[in-house]
Amino acid sequence: MIYTTLLNIAVFQGIVLGIVILKSSLFNSQSNKYLAYLLFALSFVLLNYVFEIEGAFKSYPLLCFLDYIEWIFLLPVFIFLFIINRIDDTVKNRQRAYLYYIPFIYSSTFTIIYHLNDILGIYKISDSGIFIINILRLIQLVFAFIIILFPPFYSYFMIKHLKDPQEKKWVIVLLTSLYLLLSTWLITYMTGFFFGIDISSTMSGLALSATFIMHWTAYIGIYKYKLAKDRDAVFHFLNSDLVIINPNLQVAENSIAQENITAEESRESITADNLYFQKLELLCKDDHIYTDSTLNREKVAEKLGISSGYVSQIVNTVTGDNFAHYINQYRVEAVKEMISNPEYENYNLLTMGLEAGFTSKTTFFKAFKKVTGQTPNEYKNISK
């Protein structure tokens, strides 16, 4: 009873947390979407296990099709895509993400078709077809090894591109936990498949471990590390009925308001609590959009769902600086972190500047001097 309760709580928590990440503007980024998909897939894996324990598949045979979908093949894919979507576009664009879905599509299709006769009695497999089935099943096992072992292992090499040391630690722990879970599942499954050993107790332990991963992700990812990294913004969002009911309503209201009030009145109404400014801060702190050397007001406006003029108005009113200086401050801070980080000791200053999003040596040195009052060389010598 306690065991199934823990599983049910984890399933519910995973689904709710995934929906919050997808729907909340505070967590709105491509990488966080894959984290939500990861939670959904893990929830379905646990849900199928609950159905098996409770005998739901026997009472409702059509539910078996939910079990035949190889949800577990999606876990390493989503954790990998979560990681590469948190790094710069240069690395991300080299990945052919669609290839990682092939094992899931093949295995799910093969398993569903293979079991159609068991559920619906559509056809029977002849003796001559058993050989082909065994070949297809062998391909499925090969895919299982590839998709479960390769993407998580490759992810460790991708993590080095993450710029936030705290984020690196959090992602490494999440990746390692999931990697150990999947590897143990694969070994256990193969042992039961080839040697006919009862693996139910081990699978129960793995399911329980998955619930802890779910709870840990919720605690560390949201409450401690915070994918949104802004406690006040989270509080404001969760307590704003208007935003929860219709996140696009405020955009329309702002457009109407800008037509009916003067520019001076509009500036006075904008504060650091402005939802769009908070979203912009999160885009810079979490998604590191400033590392895009082609970033401009139009691109940011598109991400926020407002006009480029309103972007400038918000930044000017809240910070007292123009948009370019606001973005350059983040770039300068990124360079300062690289200077103090031993991982970048082989980088020269210009390379650091380009990594941070500056387009040339001139703009880099000029912006760094304006923000810190020192040249990059002076800052580097003093910081040693």
Image: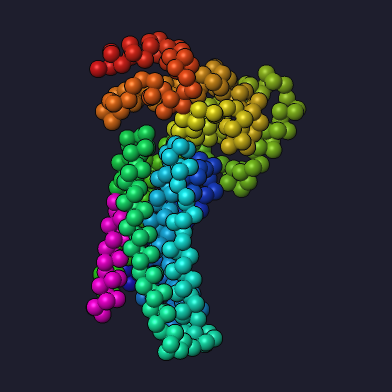
Q: Which residue is pictured at 26% across the width and 69% down the height?
A: 188
The answer to whether one can see residue 176 in this image is yes
- Which color mode does the image show? rainbow
The part of the image, by quadrant, that contains residue 104 is: bottom left
Q: Quadrant of the N terminus?
A: bottom left
Q: Which residue is pictured at 43% across the width and 53% down the height?
A: 78
Expressed as whole percent of the image width and height from the top left, the position of residue 187 reads 26, 66
- Using the image, determine if residue 126 lies above or below residue 114: below
Return the residue found at the far right.
260
Task: State whether the magenta stretch is mostly helix, strand or loop.
Answer: helix
Expressed as whole percent of the image width and height from the top left, the position of residue 242 reads 61, 43
Expressed as whole percent of the image width and height from the top left, the position of residue 165 reads 32, 35
Question: Considering depth in this image, is 103 or 34 the residue closer to the camera?
Answer: 103
Question: Considering depth in this image, is 134 or 272 the residue closer to the camera?
Answer: 134
How many marks overall? Answer: 0
Tell me: 166 left or right of 84: left
Expressed as whole percent of the image width and height from the top left, the position of residue 129 reads 44, 84
**Can residue 11 be found in the magenta stretch?**
no
Q: Which residue is pictured at 61% across the width and 48% down the height?
A: 245
- Using the image, determine if residue 149 lies above or below residue 64: above
Tell me: 281 left or right of 334: right
The answer to whether one can see residue 222 in this image is no
**Can residue 181 be found in the magenta stretch?**
yes
Question: Considering depth in this image, is 348 or 276 the residue closer to the camera?
Answer: 348
- Using the image, determine if residue 247 lies above or below residue 141: above
Q: Which residue is pictured at 38% across the width and 56% down the height?
A: 76
Q: Which residues are magenta?
A: 176-198
Q: Quadrant of the C terminus?
A: top left
